[in-house]
């Protein structure tokens, strides 16, 4: 641990424990070392270790059981580091040692909402393709994706939509070169809660995304509803010296 680092010691311990879980490939339900063992390993007090474990517990990464110890939670939340560029859900799962899967709820041609048409740089009253899917990690529902495409993306009707959308787009000459995303918080309605196996009114992260080709033309726009304790976004920024 680095006491000269501005990061509190308990947060440093929590980060080291995350690395420990990944490096030792601990499965859900496996026990972590005791507070005393962790205190000796990291050279910090047991109070610091306890705060680190409480932080991980609040993020649903570990579960503390009275009199038994601390265990890896049933599913660790995945993390997308937005500084590292765009990674698909499938790629994030695989890099985390998690099995991705998909349930396709629908693929059809519709009249695009005016806002969506504008985002795709299409005239009002344009038709487009809407694709709706539920994404799972180790069979646990993580997000509902609703993606809108111009009708020229009709190749989607001939693809297996249970895999990576980004791979499908690359294969069909529509590789993504840039993207933007607006993050909001919303509450789940009855349909969303049913799909995601959460209570009605549970907070969700809403991501409105636009994805562009190398000519800066929109490929598709998305609306993702994400269960906040199953998927996390890491945003990094730095201030240039002046």
Image (cartoon, rainbow, N blue to C red):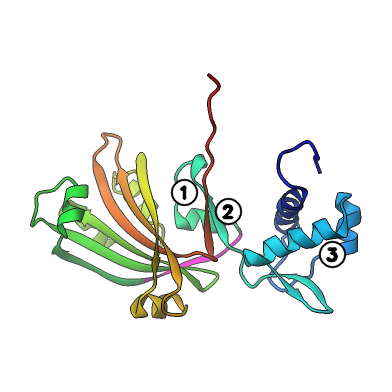
> Secondary structure beneath disc 2?
helix
Quadrant of the image containing the N terminus: top right
Q: Residue at x 68, y 66 (%)?
A: 57
> Secondary structure beneath disc 1?
loop
Is 110 left, or right, of 52 in this rendering? left
**Where is mark 3, residue-wise?**
33
Q: Residue at x 54, y 41 (%)?
A: 236
Q: Residue at x 68, y 71 (%)?
A: 28
Q: Residue at x 79, y 62 (%)?
A: 50
Q: Is residue 110 above or below residue 19?
A: below
User: Disc 3, disc 2: CB below 8 Å?
Assistant: no
Of marks 1 and 3, the one in the foreground: 3
Q: What's the distance in space between the residues labelled 2 and 1, CA to CA?
A: 10 Å
Tag of residue 87 = 1
Tag of residue 226 = none
Residue 163: image x %, image y %? 41, 61
Residue 15: image x %, image y %? 71, 51
Residue 72 drawn in magenta = no
User: Disc 2, disc 1: CB below 8 Å?
Assistant: yes
**Where is mark 2, residue-wise?**
95
Residue 139: image x %, image y %? 52, 73
């Amino acid at each position: 641990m680095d006491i000269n680092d501005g990061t509190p010691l308990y947060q440093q311990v929590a980060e080291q424990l995350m690395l420990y879980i990944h490096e030792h490939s601990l499965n859900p339900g496996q026990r972590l070392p005791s507070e005393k063992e962790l205190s000796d390993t990291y050279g910090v007090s047991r109070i610091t270790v306890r705060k680190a474990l409480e932080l991980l517990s609040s993020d649903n990464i570990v579960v503390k059981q009275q009199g038994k110890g601390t265990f890896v939670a049933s599913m660790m939340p995945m993390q997308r580091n937005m500084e590292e560029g765009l990674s698909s859900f499938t790629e994030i799962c695989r890099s985390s040692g998690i099995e991705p899967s998909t349930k396709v709820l629908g693929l059809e041609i519709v009249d695009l909402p005016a806002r969506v048409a504008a985002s795709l740089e299409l005239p009002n009253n344009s038709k487009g393709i809407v694709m709706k899917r539920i994404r799972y990690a180790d069979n646990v529902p993580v997000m509902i994706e609703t993606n809108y495409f111009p009708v020229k993306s009709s190749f989607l009707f001939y693809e297996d939509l249970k895999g990576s959308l980004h791979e499908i787009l690359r294969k069909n000459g529509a590789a993504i070169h840039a993207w933007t995303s607006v993050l909001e918080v919303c509450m789940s309605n009855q349909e969303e809660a049913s799909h995601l196996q959460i209570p009605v009114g549970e907070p969700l992260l809403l991501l409105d995304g636009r994805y562009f080709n190398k000519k800066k033309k929109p490929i598709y726009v998305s609306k993702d509803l994400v269960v906040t304790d199953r998927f996390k976004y890491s945003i990094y920024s730095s201030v240039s010296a002046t």
